[in-house]
Image: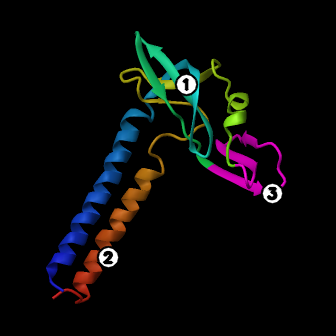
Amino acid sequence: MDRTLFLILLLAGVVIFMIGIFALIKRNKYYNPHCLVQGSAKIIGHDFTQTVPTPVLQFFINGTEYKIKPRYKMVSGVRTPTQSKPEFWVDANGHAHYKINSFVNDFRPIANEIYPIGNEMRILYNQQNPKFAIVPGFAKKGSISSLIFTVIGILVIISSAVIFAGGFVK
């Protein structure tokens, strides 16, 4: 093998590592500890990206509309063949739990029971840039994904160095 593989791996590792670092910097710059202003947001819909329903929130600051879709810190569930109605709850740590019938994978019928459209939820937002808002009890954006990108980037850089130093590249 020539040095092309080493250079490709090294470049990929650096790019992945930098994506993770930039995501961490962005998260810390806008979310922590800058989300200090309390406000309320209206539930205008539901999102099912994490299998279970999360509220779609709308709020206005100085006449400008903002929408956020908070995410749970973790989702875990049990599928049973006999569960007639889906059950859903969020614990104090922001982890979502569910029980659902194995044959019915849909929380849409009970989404409005969990997060009724039109209800208000408390939010914290960045006064300089309100689009960076969080919902207390939900995960802060980028917390896990930025860490995963950083670690994978480091592993790819190390593996490319091992390939090069180990004599696999001539």
Going from N to C along the chain, the mark reached first, 2 or 3, is 3
Q: CA distance from mark 3 to mark 1?
A: 38 Å
Q: Are marks 1 and 2 in contact (CB under 8 Å)?
A: no
Residue 155 falls left or right of residue 121: left
Q: CA distance from mark 1 to mark 2?
A: 43 Å
Q: For the point 80% across and 42% down, which residue is it? A: 85
Q: Which residue is mark 1?
A: 123
Residue 123 percent coordinates (x, y)? 55, 25
Residue 34 percent coordinates (x, y)? 43, 29
Residue 148, by quadrant, is bottom left
Residue 112 percent coordinates (x, y)? 69, 28
Going from N to C along the chain, the mark reached first, 1 or 2, is 1
Up the image or down, 87 lies above or below 78; here it is above
Q: Nearer the viewer, residue 118 or 71?
A: 118
Region rendered in magenta: 75-104
Q: Is residue 93 magenta?
A: yes
Secondary structure at numbered mark 3: loop
Q: Which residue is mark 3?
A: 81
Q: Residue furthest front?
A: 103
Q: Categorize mark 1 by other alpha carbons within 10 Å: few (<14), some (14-19), many (20+).
A: many
Q: For the point 37% across and 24% down, which residue is it? A: 129
**Identity of the amino acid at label 1?**
Ile
Secondary structure at numbered mark 1: strand
Q: Which residue is mark 2?
A: 159
Q: CA distance from mark 2 to mark 3?
A: 45 Å
Image mark for residue 55: none
Residue 58 falls left or right of residue 20: right
**Identity of the amino acid at label 3?**
Pro
**Identity of the amino acid at label 2?**
Ser
Q: Nearer the viewer, residue 101 or 98?
A: 101
Q: For the point 34% across and 43% down, which residue is it? A: 25
